[in-house]
Image: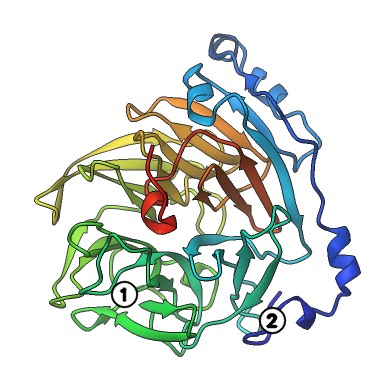
Amino acid sequence: MSLPSGQGIAAIPLSYDFISRLHLDSQQMSSLVNVSLLAGAADATYFTSLSNLSVPAISLQAYQPEFYNVLGHGARARKVWDLPWEAFHEAGIYNRRDNSLYVSSNYKSLEDNINITVVSLDSDDYPFHSTQFPNLAMANGGSSYYPPGCQHNETPPMQIWCDEGDFHTYSQLLAVDPNTNKSTTIVTSFLGRNFSSLNDVRQHPITGDLWFTDADYGYFQHFRSEPTQPKQVYRFEPTTGIIQVVADGFVQPNGLEFSPDLKTLYVTDTGAQQFKAVPTQPATIYAFDIVDEKRLRNRRAFAWADTGFPDGIHCDTQGNVWAGCGDGVHVWNPDGILLGKIFVGETSNNFAFAPGKVFVFSNHRLWVVENIKAQGREVCKDFGVGCQ
């Protein structure tokens, strides 16, 4: 459901009282559920029994004892919002000035385009409103952005968004200042060839280069023309304009993330979802070695999602890899072993860390796991707090 530019909840043809009744806190959970991999290995129906909940509902599931060290024994999980439109889809970029997360909504139609959902962290109720940014047609993934010349020890001055484009506008990387509502186009093409549907982006914290993926979901969702170039991963230098293809051979490259030591790049391939579900196509996270902060080598399969596909991906400061999947957020250790799940019983396209918590986006619903031990790779930089 779309809102007029710059307006919030009041623009929705529903009363605020009705919206408030949708703000449902589920029962808080003080402990994790242990999963027996040996039982599951002998009985394939065992895993179905784990999901025998009145879904959507949140559950913390430990596949390995290490998951307790990741979340901490005091983790609490609850549902924050349950809405009649898909407000919580991708991105989840922090803006310190208003202490809010900026989340892209899901695409519905060309007449009802993507909005930005602004979730305030000032209250445990996490109130929100919706807005739009100039020149941002179809927002998807995004990240904090430091333009050339900015010190990376400051909290982020801007946001960088993947704009998938439409039939009239290019797909592009767009820098946005959410505090002034001004935007600047960063790159629209590979040497004149427009991208298909830019999906997700990360800025290298040392070089300032932008690494991003180009899929063609705009074509599958009928708001972009048929693709004219392969689905690839790119590196762009905002200071020089240099752009390179750094990886190809994907069905649908989607989320990407640096390891905390910046030696590895993780890229998700969501080829299992195209015009329809294609379960024989990749639902895979690939890992690459980063060479000289500019190139990739040694591609290998890091993990495969047992449910749905891995979409948005982030690392914590200990090197664990988190990804939004078909039933919630999955967490793997640096060796690719599944440690556990934040199970919500439906697709989580992305999520966002904040100090001591993680927010899970499942389109209609926003969930939060609070009092967690893990800290996102970018939290100390974006929030201006110390790393553990």
Circle 1 SS class: loop
What kind of residue is marked 1?
Answer: Thr
Return the x and y of residue 354 as percentages of the image width and height: 52, 50
Of callouts 2 and 1, the N-terminal one: 2
Q: Amino acid at mark 2?
A: Leu
Q: Which residue is mark 1?
A: 228
Q: Within the image, what quadrant is residue 160 found in?
A: bottom left
Q: Could you say whether the residue bearing mark 2 is in a helix, strand or loop?
A: loop
Residue 3, numbered label: 2
**Which dot marks residue 93?**
none
> Mark 2 or mark 1, which is nearer to you?
2
Provide residue 247's location: percent of width, then percent of height: 22, 55
Q: Is residue 175 visible?
A: yes
Badge 2 density bin: few <14, some 14–19, many ≥20, Cα 10 Å:
many
- Quadrant in which the C terminus appears: top left
Position above or below: 160 against 45: below
Q: Describe residue 361's horizontal placement relative to residue 279 as left or right.
A: right
Spot the residue most to the bottom.
Answer: 168
Residue 172 shows up from this direction:
no
User: In terms of image quadrants, where is residue 212?
Assistant: bottom left
x 55%, y 35%: residue? 372
Q: In screen coordinates, is 140 left or right of 21?
A: left
> With respect to residue 110, does 57 lie above or below?
above
